[in-house]
Image: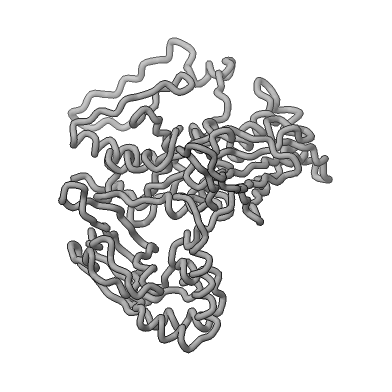
């Protein structure tokens, strides 16, 4: 050992007891079960009432409805130029079910692009209406006179919406609101003159417009359903009206969706490394957790039956100021009776909390299965990270009524499957291959159904990144 001049020699203390590294060889390690960060609370699966579906299909029979144009218009953007997809013009009530793509393409080419600034008025209340607006991007407030003479926001629309559609066929149409831009944006405008010139030239379009006009003469209630004739408040012996309740001729059917995987475990692992925890059981437990997570994701985001894609257009609203405020949640609640729950991304719940703090409001909490959950107006707000957040840092908040008896949102499954380990989830032994690997087929069947349109509402384009 070399010693530098002027320094003290290093003194090594001899070991007087057994080191911990050596002692561990004789100790039994306490182990946890395998952990998984993907597991969430899955409130949607826990709170939905589940209906048993025999035969794998659930049919939703509804009263006949004449509502049309319940979708959104989609656009294509090339640089700063925006064009409407021709087939998407079929979302307008007047063009519903019109399938001549050449005519729709010519109509799309007749649309004129306008760019507007925040605060700009696109229409004026009471003025003649001779054009339809297709909103490609931005948010617009529809403002009308309130009951005491002041202005009131009747509705807020955003990307994909349209307004002024009645003016295409009605020469005497007037604007029933002032359309004022809340944000900068872009819209396409189709004038009644351009539409009428094309209808006069194309026989199929003219006949379709006449057919839609005849269909609109049918008597309906406030929800667009075929009216039921009744008499009330009469005296004497008047002739009572006769009536019947008509049903939809082609009701929607929901087929159970599926999530599957093949779990593989080597026989050597299952035989030799099974204590103190059963390897197969732990592998299956984590696989089931992953399947349930994917199930909740599909029930929200699947384009066929996911709740975000199946909410009726009339049940979708926009936040008044972009951020999710108490007024927006009140508007969402007012659109349906007996709301059971809100469902929102945790970041949307945080944004709502910030808005409440600004106003000095402190939302209450309610007890749900032993867990304290934040609530608004007594309706619990459950977190769900499966609700997507867009690149613009916007998301959605869902509000729903649940249960088959209340004509709400329900989950669909089929319990009683062979080798079932949970309701509508089975684990089937598939055998051992030549490499001594055991295979199990793990399958989950599920779907979701909205029994009537007002059972589900969505607050769209909620900003979660604004901190002012």
Q: Across the whole image, how many numbered discs are drawn on residues?
A: 0
Please tell me whether residue 98 is drawn above or below residue 293 in the rendered image.
Answer: below
**Colour scheme in the image?**
one colour
> Which quadrant is home to the N terminus?
top left
Residues 57 and 367: in front is 57
> Looking at the picture, how far across and down is residue 339, in whole percent?
44, 35
The residue shown at (22%, 63%) is 125
The residue shown at (43%, 80%) is 107
> Looking at the picture, how far across and down is residue 385, in whole percent?
44, 41
The residue shown at (38%, 68%) is 166
The residue shown at (57%, 25%) is 33
**Furthest-bottom residue in view?**
201
**Residue 136 seen by the camera:** no
Within the image, what quadrant is residue 371 found in?
A: top left
Image-based side of 153 in relation to 244, left or right: left
Residues 176 and 75: in front is 176
Image-based side of 437 in relation to 395, left or right: right
Please tell me whether residue 317 is drawn above or below residue 29 in the rendered image.
Answer: below
**Furthest-top residue in view?**
16
Residues 35 and 237: in front is 237
> Looking at the picture, how far across and down is residue 43, in whole percent?
49, 33
Please tell me whether residue 238 is drawn above or below residue 114 in the rendered image.
Answer: above
Image-based side of 283 in relation to 377, left or right: right
Image-based side of 374 in relation to 114, left or right: right
Please tell me whether residue 57 is drawn above or below residue 69 in the rendered image.
Answer: above
**Residue 446 seen by the camera:** yes
Within the image, what quadrant is residue 65 found in?
A: bottom right
> Which quadrant is home to the C terminus?
top left
> Looking at the picture, how far across and down is residue 29, in whole percent?
56, 19
């Amino acid at each position: 050992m070399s010693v530098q001049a002027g320094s003290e020699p290093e003194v090594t203390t001899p070991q007087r007891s057994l080191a911990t590294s050596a002692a561990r060889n004789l100790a039994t390690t306490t182990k946890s079960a395998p952990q998984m960060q993907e597991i969430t609370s899955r409130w949607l699966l826990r709170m939905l009432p589940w209906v048993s579906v025999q035969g794998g299909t659930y049919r939703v029979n509804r009263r006949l409805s004449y509502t049309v144009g319940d979708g959104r218009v989609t656009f294509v953007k090339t640089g700063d130029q925006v064009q409407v997809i021709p087939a998407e013009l079929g979302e307008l009530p007047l063009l519903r079910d019109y399938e001549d793509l050449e005519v729709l393409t010519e109509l799309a080419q007749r649309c004129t692009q306008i760019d507007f600034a925040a605060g700009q008025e696109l229409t004026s209340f009471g003025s003649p209406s001779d054009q339809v607006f297709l909103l490609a991007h931005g948010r617009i407030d529809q403002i009308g006179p309130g009951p005491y003479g002041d202005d009131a926001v009747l509705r807020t629309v955003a990307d994909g919406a349209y307004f002024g559609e009645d003016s295409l066929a009605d020469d005497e149409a007037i604007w029933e609101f002032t359309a004022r831009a809340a944000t900068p944006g872009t819209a396409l405008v189709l004038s009644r003159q351009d539409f009428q010139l094309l209808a006069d030239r194309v026989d199929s379009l003219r006949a379709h417009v006449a057919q839609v006009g005849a269909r609109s003469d049918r008597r309906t209630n406030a929800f667009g359903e075929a009216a039921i004739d009744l008499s009330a408040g009469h005296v004497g012996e008047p002739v009572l009206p006769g009536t019947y309740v008509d049903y939809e001729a082609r009701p929607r059917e929901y087929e159970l969706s599926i999530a599957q995987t093949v779990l593989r475990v080597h026989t050597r692992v299952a035989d030799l490394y099974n204590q103190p925890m059963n390897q197969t059981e732990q592998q299956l437990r984590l696989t089931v957790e992953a399947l349930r997570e994917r199930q909740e994701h599909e029930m929200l985001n699947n384009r066929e039956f996911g709740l975000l894609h199946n909410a009726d257009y009339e049940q979708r609203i926009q936040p008044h100021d972009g951020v999710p405020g108490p007024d927006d949640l009140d508007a969402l609640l007012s659109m349906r009776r007996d709301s059971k729950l809100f469902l929102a991304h945790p970041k949307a719940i945080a944004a709502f909390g910030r808005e409440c703090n600004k106003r000095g409001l402190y939302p209450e909490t309610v007890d749900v299965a032993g867990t304290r959950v934040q609530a608004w107006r007594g309706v619990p707000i459950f977190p769900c990270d499966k609700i997507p957040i867009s690149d613009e840092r916007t998301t959605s908040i869902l509000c729903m009524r649940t249960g088959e008896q209340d004509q709400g949102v329900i989950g669909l499954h089929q319990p009683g499957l062979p080798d079932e380990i949970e309701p509508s989830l089975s684990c089937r032994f598939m055998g051992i291959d030549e490499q001594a690997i055991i295979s199990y087929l793990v399958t989950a069947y599920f779907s979701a159904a909205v029994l009537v349109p007002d059972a589900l509402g969505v607050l769209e384009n909620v900003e979660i990144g604004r901190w002012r």
